[in-house]
Every structure is written in C-alpha cells, then in structure tokens.
Image (cartoon, coloured by chain):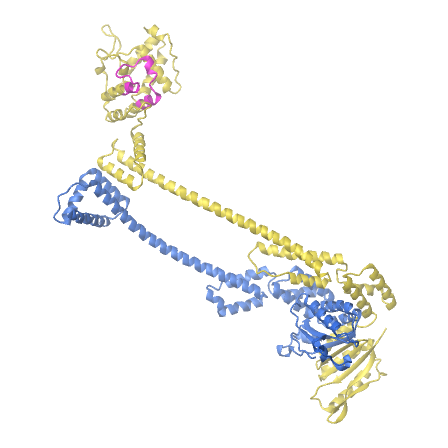
Chain colours: A blue, B yellow
Amino acid sequence: MVHDFNSVNSFQLAITSLESVPNPRGIHADVQVLASDITRLSGLEHTTFDFVPRSQRHPSGLGTAPVNGAAKLYVGLWFEAPLDKFRVVLRCVGNWLDRTAEKYSFEVKIPSAQAIAQQIDQADVKNPPAYTITLATNQAKKLAELLPLGEALLPPQELYLTKAKDYVNTFGELTPAARANLLLMRHRMGLASEETSDLNARAMGPFKTLGDKYQHFRRELLVCKQESDLDSELWQVMQAKAETMSLPEADTQFLKAERLSTLRQEADRVRQQREAEAEAERQRYREQRQRLDHYRHAFVGLVTDALVPLNLAPDAAQFRQAMMAQLSGAEFNRGRLIQAREFYNLSPQEADALEKTVLDELYLLSGLL
Amino acid sequence: MAQDIQFSIRFVDPQYKSDDVVTEVHYLIEDLRDLNGMSQTRFEPISEIRDVAEIRVGVTFAAPSDLLGPILRRLRDRLYYNPIATAFCFKMADIMLCIETHQADDLLGFIAAAQSGLLFAPERDYLAEAETYSRTQGELSPTELDNLNLLRQRLGLTAEQAEVLNARAASPYPTKADKHRHFEDMTAAEFSRLRAMDEGPPFASKDIWPVLQELAENLGLPFLEAEAIYQTHQQRYHDDTKLKTEQTTAKTAEDGRLSAEAKAEAERQKQAQQTQERLNQYRDLCRQTMTHAIYPSEFDQGRLDQARRLWGISAEQALQLETEVRDELYGGVASATGVDYNRLRNLLHQQAWHEADMETEVLILNALNLDMQPVTAATMERLSTVDLTTIDGLWNRYSKGRFGFKAQQQVYRGQQQIQADDRQRWLAFEEALGWREAPSLFSRGYKPYHDLTFSLEAPPGHLPTWRWCCPSLSDRYKINLEIMAAVIHHLNTCMPLETVTVPALDTAFPTQIA
C-alpha cells in the first residue's frame, strides 16, 4: 500500500501482522486497540488510519486464503503523524507490542533531512525523498532499536524550529510547558543551548512576548477607524502584519473582534451624543415654550385676580387698553406684572404678544357672555 | 565489535540508457573497491531485463559496520558528481533502511545516524534495553539498573558510555519523582502565566491542556497522574477566577449602589439648594423692597406676591422671611408675652420720641398685664428678658445708642463709681439722665414730665422714661427710689453689662432711703 505524505514534517508508520497461525479476530482487536491508543496521544486525536483488511494481505505473508467475513477483519494499519511525535508514537507502539506479543512488520517512512530542511514545494510534498525503515518483530525491545536510527535521521535544527514555530503559532509565545517540551527535544536531539536560544528567537519573531505582540497589534489596529476597514483590503494588510509578527490567527481574530467592539461602542457613543444634543435642543425649545406658557398662565391669573366688571368695549384694542389700564392702575397688580415679566425674562415684544393674545381671548369670551 | 551490513545499490532512473547503467555499475564497484578494507569484498550484481537483454543495474555486497561511514560518503560523492536516481538499501541485523534519490544531500541523514554510533551493537542493544525499562516503568529502578550494569559488562561498554545512554533513555528527569515535580512546576507556571494575563488587558483564551499532555508524554509520566495534577491546578485557578469575578461583581454592585445613592443625594441637595436659592432670592427681594420703608409699598407687595407664587413659596414661609428681613433691617420685635412692638418700632423709626415713650409705657404694662396700673418693685421682676431686650434694642437702634435701658445702666454704673452713698447715687443717677435738676431752695429738682427732652439732644439714657413706674405724672416725673432700685436690679439681671459690678439689692434698702 503506497501512501503520499500529507506534510513533509510528518512520518508514516505501517504495521502489519505476520502471524502465520490464524487468529484473525485477536489480531483485528489488537489493531483496533493500537489505533485507539494512538488517538489518545496529544495532538493525534484526529489521526486518520488506513486499516489493512485481511483479504488484502499478500498471500505469501499469510499462507491461508480469506474466509467468509474475513474482509471485515484488519491485520494492520497505516497512519501519518508529526515528526516530533516520533518517539511518543514508537513508545506507544512499544507498549502495545508488549501486550500483544504477536509478530508484526513495522515500516517507518521518514522524509529525508534534505526534504525537511528545504521544506520542499507543496507540489512535491506528496512524494518527497524518504527513508524507509522496515523491521519485523514481536518484541518491544527490538522495536526500540528503531528509535535511535529514526531520530538520528531527523534534522535536529529544522525539527526544533518547526516545533517552536508550532507553539508560537498556537500560543503566540513559548509558554513554560512549551519551553519544557522544547528542552526535552533539545536533549533528545543533542542540540546546544545557544543553538536552541537562537532557534527560539527565530520562532518568536521580532517580539519577545505575546503581550508585546498584542500591544503592537492593538496599536496597528487603531488605523482601522470604522467597521468597514476590518472587512476590506486594509484587514488583509493587517493579517499580513500579524503573520509577520507571528501572532496566532486566534489572537488576530480576537483583537479584530475587540477593535470591532470598540468601534461599535464609539459609534454608539457618537450616536448617543448626537441624540443627546438633539434632545438638549428639543429641551431648550420645550423650555422656551414652557416659559411662554407659564407667563401666559401667570398673566391669566393676574388678569383674573384683577378682573372687575367692565363695560363692553367696542373693539378688542380698546378692551386691551382698558384691561391694561386696570392692571396698571393698581400698584399691587402692576408690581405682580413687572415681577412676572422679569421672572420669565421675556422681551417686551414677547410679553406684549402674549398679553395681547390673552386679552383678545378674554375679549371674545366677554362678547359671548 | 563490527557487524556486517548488507548493501544493495540499484540505479532506477528509467531515462538512463542500458549501456550507461552498466558502466555506472562498473564504476560504482570500482569506487567502492577502492576504499580501504573493501578490496576483498565480493560484489554481487543485480540484473534486470531491459529491451529483451539482461543487464546489470546494481550491486549487492556485505561490509563491516565500521566501513559504513566511508561507504556512505563515497556514495554521496558519486551522487554529487552524477545525480542519477538510485535506490539504496542497507540491512543492519533485522532492520532494513532504504532510500531512493538522486540528491547527494539526501544521504546526509544516514551519514549522521551512522556517526551517532547508536545504530550498532553494543550501544544499540544497551540503549534499546534502557529505553524499554524507561518506557515501561517511567524510570530506571535499582533492579533495572543492576540488569543494565550486567548488560553493560557483557557488551563491553564503559560505565561512562552506559551513563550517557541511560540519560538518553531516561531524559533529564530520570526518576518518576523528578518527572512528577517537573510536571507540577510547569503546570503551576502555565497557570501563573494565565493569572498574569488575567491582570492586564484581555487575551484570547486558549486550552493549555494539550501542551501539558504532550509534556507528560514526553516525560513518560502516566496520563492519569498528569491529568490529576492539571485538574488540581485548574480547579484552583477556576476558584481564584470565580472569587475574583464575585469580588468584582460585588464591587460593581456596591459602586452602583453608592453611585445611585450619591446621585440621589446630589439630586436631593440640588433640590434643597434650589429651594434655598428661591428663598434667598425672595429674601433679597424683601430686603430690596424694605430698604426704604418698614413696610413695602403696594407696588412692591405686588412684586413680592407674584414672586412668592412663581417661586412656589408658601404664604407662611414668605411671611416669616419678610419678618426676618424687617427685623434685620429695623430691629427685632420679639416678645415673650405676645406684645406687638411694631407700633413702637414705627414711632422710633419716625423719631417720634415722645409718642414712642408713651407707647413704651403701654407695651410694658401690657406685657405685665397691669391694665394701666404702675409697675411696682414686685411686678417689675415679671418683665421678661425678651421684652426688655426688644424695647432696649429698638430705642438703642433708632437713637444710635443714646437711649435705651443699656444706656441707662451705663449711666448708673458711672454713678456707682462716683457715689458711695446709695441715696446720693440714685439722685445723681436721675440728674445724669436729665430726669431731675440739681435741688434748690425752692425745688427738689424734679421736672414735670412734659418738660423732659424728647429729642436726640437729651442726655444719654434720658429715654425711655420710666413713667410706667409712676403712679401719677400730674405733678412731677418722680420715681420711687425703691422701684428705681428694683428696675436697675432687674435690668442688670436680664441684660448684664460687661464687667459691671451690680450692687446686691439690699432688702433693707427701701427702709433706709425712706
């Protein structure tokens, strides 16, 4: 079974039963258990397995013809995993082999160091030059011999840098646990402390911490002055900047949402301010109307208080004149009138107009009476 | 201890001509045989059918492991000068390693592996054993170390070599306790990082378990153990976060409550201030309208009435304010007995001294409820301090300190310092007040009431007269000395002068002066 690589930073492992004594169900169960064990490892939860059906096995390896229903039974599996998981996977397989004690053929395919170092084009990823290591054993100790060989074939710097970049792309920085993992990798790969410091710095990019990246990107985002900027070409530029500074996509989106929220709040605030200004203007108008109404009311009260029987005037003008004379005649009423005008701060024109209206209405009423 | 490696090298470039392939195989054998220790090596050809003819496309041979390095380098050099697609296979004991490439650098990985010294016994066998022990138990137990020591001796490895291989198998944290501690430290550090991030501006939240799980796997720490450590720290972190959130929520609620209270208080104060401002405005208007007259003109009353309506001031409040302002401008008219001193104030304001003096008599008798009966030494004591102070205040204010009870007390004090004899002192007091002239052969000096001086030219303390003590004014304005002493005593009691020594009323005094 030939499989293409999904990534040049991964290895492939094919495991096939070599037992000549037929125990198809036992082997099938073992294979399923191994697949389950592998998916319990961190970062391998979504591993895709190709299972080798019993019927597909080469006749020479099995020695017996498929029986009814045998096609549904598996005798092996194949999967691909990241290169940095090489040791963990082989240890897991070693544990499994300890339990099964059946003989299996193990085939490990590792891209050549050159292919990994050059990170060859995507087009060539599927079939890069690769080392194939094969071993047939039922002993975990024998399988363990694959470990130093496989690890020796890996390019230490490239692998370390890839792993550090993975952490930075996930967390935006090298967290304590990430650094601890990298330290173990450094130890396994035999890298010097100075080398890994340089590689860490390369992985981190120009900023030392995630906080610095956030601070810088937040500042950069200030150029987005309105919501539409975050959907336009400008956002693509911002994304490119985020990528350059090794800010993870999740963080970029988080900061985008934060900026979006701020812009919406600002827009809301501006809208509310405008509404408040409009409301203040309306209030001023209402107060002006209220002032006039109150004066009108006060004037009506004053006229009512001062009202004495009056001969019907021939016209409104004379009625007004008579009423005003009556009002001004009594010092007390005159004082009230002056005080009311002062209180409402009315211009003489405003006061005259209002008083005229009130007195005209009163004239009409006097006519009706 | 060199072991044999089976080599298989086959040219697989389909574009390469058969003759050229045969030539390449020939040169390959020659190149390899040229290496030190390879001259006696037996090379077996690999043949295949091409264009009906069988041709040599490669070669197999066996060589000791110590020649692996030179052979690989030679093969790399050949590929470097002639990059022809070639399939290389190396069989080391049970392990087969193959690669098909035309690039010389693709062999570098295997060259490095060969140089590591870990591919062959005894290092390979020892490391595999140590790795197996480390994998299964998480550490090298004393028994396992004993076993490894025996293996080391059997394989002929030095103690130092074994130590290096042990460290490689067991990682920098060789014991389970070390691994546990390291994992615990790293987990704590991860949560510390989260706590630090929580302190500042917000960050996108990320799951830290996968990287910690990876660490546990790399360390060889059992999953359940690692998970338990992680969950303990996670629980602690969640508890802290929850507590902080609760505190923040409580603080926000408390701030909100305080803010609402402060707002309500501010509103209340604003309303109180507004009310006070209106009262002050009304008070100012009162002051403005009463500056020139005790009672505002009708026009000003109209203004006050309208202002009171507009500012929402009750009639009672307005009246009180007007009274306060009037008292402030024209003197208070307080009375303990409900006597109305307004007329007295009006008369004094008009400088109508004579009428004011008569009004004073009426008011004092009213205050003592005497119904025109003269005040006696006994009834005098009933005259309240409030009323005395009001009468004195009004006389004092409108005479600019010339008249009033205090002025009379001052005169008496002056006489006290001069006259030791009581009778002479009282007579001198009356003379000083201008109520009596110096006695002559024809007169004892007492004046008729209408001859007293009802103007500001009168001597200090001349007014108000004490006519309310006199049973009759038909003859002369003459006051009984006993009553005079009682009045002064009562005045000194109710309105003591500063640093004045008031003579104690001698109960025997009236008898003496009689």
Looking at this view, is B102 or A352 the one in front? Answer: A352
Against A100, residue B396 (above or below) is above
| Residue A289 vertical placement versus B325 (above, below) | below
Q: Which residues are magenta?
A: B363-391
Picture quadrant of residue A309 = top left
Which residue is at the far front? A68
Question: Percent position (x, y) of residue B237?
Answer: 62, 54
Question: Which quadrant holds the C terminus of chain B?
Answer: top left
Magenta span contains residue B382: yes
Residue at the farthest bottom position? B52
The residue shown at (80%, 65%) is B130
Taking the image as shown, residue B490 lies to the left or right of residue B121, namely left
The relative height of residue B362 versus residue B277 in the rendered view (above or below) is above
Instruction: Count every numbered label the image shows and give the total.
Output: 0
B157 in magenta:
no
Whether residue B34 appears in this view of the structure is: no
**Residue B143 as seen in the image, left or right of residue A369:** right
Quarter of the image that includes the N terminus of chain B: bottom right
Would you say residue B267 is visible in this rendering?
yes
Work out whether B495 lies above or below A125.
above
Residue at horizontal 34 percent and vertical 52 percent from the top: A283
Q: Position of residue B115 (x, y in %)?
A: 78, 72
Asked which quadrant contains residue B146, the reply is bottom right
Q: Position of residue A40 (x, y in %)?
A: 68, 66
Q: Quadrant of residue A148?
A: bottom right
Residue A320 place in picture, x, y as percent? 17, 47
